[in-house]
């Protein structure tokens, strides 16, 4: 008997919308009476069979004390940071990354070779190994709380440390997630060991999935970010990347492409000194003028205590003096370089007004550039942020653009020639004993990086 007709069935498994689809024909029944046409998405199963290693690595890395020291003048500021850097270099080598190494300053460099014949820009992923000096990082005991259901989490080594959803609203988004905390007496160190572990997992994924097309990828782990010296000994020429991303942010899906622009201002007031017993109509006390200047600064605006969002400030950070001479150090912050200038002019005017009362006293006013808003660089390299936005979308996350009210290694790297916005790493409540992180957020950061390198290859 002749088969009636070949029967075709079109099946789309609907596993995903994004990405190219391949058509696979197969004969289901013998003899050939039924042909099934699969439409199979290529990039959705990308992580389907992958066992993420970010959390497992993170639990190991946080137990290594890597606190940096702001008082130290050595590089790195503490030798113990190298304890982790050495392990990272070894683990990268074990993955098959031949050039992975730590240099004398404690920086780790590594190259994941390209898997494409296209000419693709070199992307760098960067994280810092040190933890903040604000809170102890010795004997960190990480705890994994599986399947979080919104309950208060009491940290066992100090029961007064309680993680509550009412204090940390982001926890609302983490129902069902596995959450890692410290035990109550130390910080956790997700800033930035989360970024470190995620980059390591991204490397592991790409080294075990060489069918995925991407260009050359550079890995950079730095010491001393928390003490503002993370880029002091970095060798960008050796790194050889076109642009990069620090993995050092918070909520899943967040992307930071703006930082403050920052100047320091030093004001030196010269008074007039005389023997205090015979000082009538002669002495001008520089410390008292300094007091007047500080008292005249606005308290309900232009100060760190009264500003948030996109507003900057004038902030006295140190006073030192004697009657004859008094020095005040200020930091000036704004998102616009123009705004910095305006604040400096305002401060100078305020000081001039005070000084008018004391014609025999004088002052010096010195402005030092500290760092600039990375947006100035990223605005002329729009693809860097665009790739990240698309990668976040492909990872199934909602994009959250944020500005950093501070400076990052990324802002310094951007001005050193490596445009470098900041991608989320999942860090929450950083620099505190209540620090926490979601394992699922960490895995999403890994996915985002992989999507990002694929996007860059596709668009090259
Ligand atoms: Zn950090």
Image (spheres, rainbow, N blue to C red):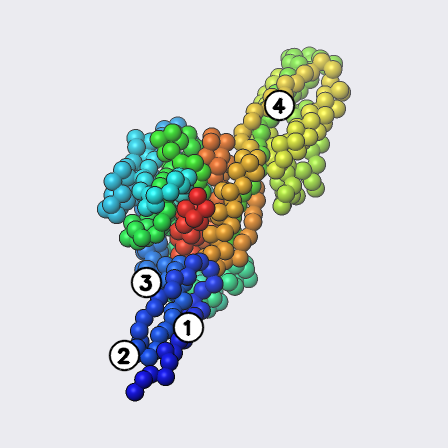
Q: Which residue is label 3 attached to?
A: 49
Instruction: Please state the horizontal and vertical placement of residue 428, each as a whole percent of the image.
Output: 47, 53
Marks 3/4: CA distance?
Answer: 61 Å
Report, in whole angstroms, how far the alpha carbon at label 2 lies from the one at label 1.
19 Å
Determine whether 290 is above or below 154 in the image.
above
- SS state under label 2: loop
- The residue located at (27%, 79%) in the rendering is 30
- Real-space Cα separation, disc 1 to disc 4, in angstroms: 74 Å
Q: Is residue 233 left or right of residue 383?
A: left
Q: Which mark is residue 30?
A: 2
Mark 3 residue crowding within 10 angstroms, few (<14) / some (14–19) / many (20+): few
Name the residue nearer the viewer: 130 or 215.
Answer: 215
> How crowded is the residue under tag 1: few (<14 C-alpha within 10 Å), some, or many (20+)?
few
How far apart are the alpha carbons under marks 2 and 4?
Answer: 89 Å
Q: Is residue 227 visible?
A: no
Residue holding disc 1:
11
Callout 1 secondary element: strand
Q: Judging from the image, what secondary structure is the residue with disc 3 in?
A: loop
């Amino acid at each position: 008997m002749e088969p009636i007709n070949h029967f075709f069935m079109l099946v789309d498994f609907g596993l995903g919308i994004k990405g190219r689809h391949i058509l696979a024909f197969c004969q289901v029944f013998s003899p050939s009476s039924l042909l099934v046409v699969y439409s199979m998405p290529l990039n959705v199963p990308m992580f389907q069979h992958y066992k993420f290693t970010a959390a497992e690595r993170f639990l190991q890395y946080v137990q290594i004390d890597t606190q940096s020291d702001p008082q130290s003048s050595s590089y790195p500021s503490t030798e113990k940071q190298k304890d982790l850097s050495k392990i990272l270099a070894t683990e990268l080598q074990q993955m098959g990354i031949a050039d992975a190494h730590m240099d004398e300053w404690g920086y780790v460099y590594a190259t994941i070779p390209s898997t494409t014949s296209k000419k693709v820009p070199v992307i760098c992923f960067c994280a810092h190994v040190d933890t903040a000096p604000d809170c102890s990082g010795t004997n960190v005991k990480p705890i994994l709380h599986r399947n979080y259901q919104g309950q208060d989490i009491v940290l066992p080594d100090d029961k007064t440390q309680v993680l509550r959803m009412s204090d940390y609203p982001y926890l609302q988004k983490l129902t069902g997630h596995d959450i890692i905390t410290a035990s109550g007496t130390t910080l956790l160190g997700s800033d930035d060991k989360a970024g470190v572990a995620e980059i390591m997992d991204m490397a592991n994924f790409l080294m075990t999935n060489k069918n995925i097309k991407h260009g050359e990828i550079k890995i950079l782990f730095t010491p001393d970010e928390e003490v503002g010296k993370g880029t002091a000994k970095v060798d960008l020429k050796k790194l050889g990347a076109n642009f990069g991303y620090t993995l050092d942010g918070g909520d899943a899906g967040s992307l930071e492409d703006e930082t403050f622009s920052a100047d320091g201002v030093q004001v030196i007031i010269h008074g007039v000194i005389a023997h205090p017993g015979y000082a009538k109509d002669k002495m001008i006390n520089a410390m008292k003028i300094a007091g007047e200047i500080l008292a005249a600064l606005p308290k309900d605006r232009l100060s760190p205590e009264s500003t948030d969002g996109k507003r900057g400030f004038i902030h006295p950070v140190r006073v030192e003096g004697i009657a004859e001479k008094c020095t005040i150090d200020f930091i000036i912050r704004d998102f616009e370089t123009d705004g910095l200038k305006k604040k400096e002019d305002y401060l100078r005017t305020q000081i001039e007004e005070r000084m008018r009362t004391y014609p025999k006293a004088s002052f010096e006013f010195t402005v030092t550039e500290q760092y600039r808003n990375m947006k100035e660089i990223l605005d002329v390299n729009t693809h860097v942020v665009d790739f990240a936005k698309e990668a976040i979308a492909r990872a199934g996350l909602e994009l959250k653009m944020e500005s950093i009210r501070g400076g990052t290694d990324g802002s310094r790297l951007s001005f050193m020639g490596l445009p470098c916005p900041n991608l989320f790493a999942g860090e929450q409540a950083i620099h505190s004993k209540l620090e926490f992180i979601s394992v699922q957020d960490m895995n999403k950061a890994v996915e985002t990086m992989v999507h990002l390198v694929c996007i860059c290859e596709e668009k090259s």
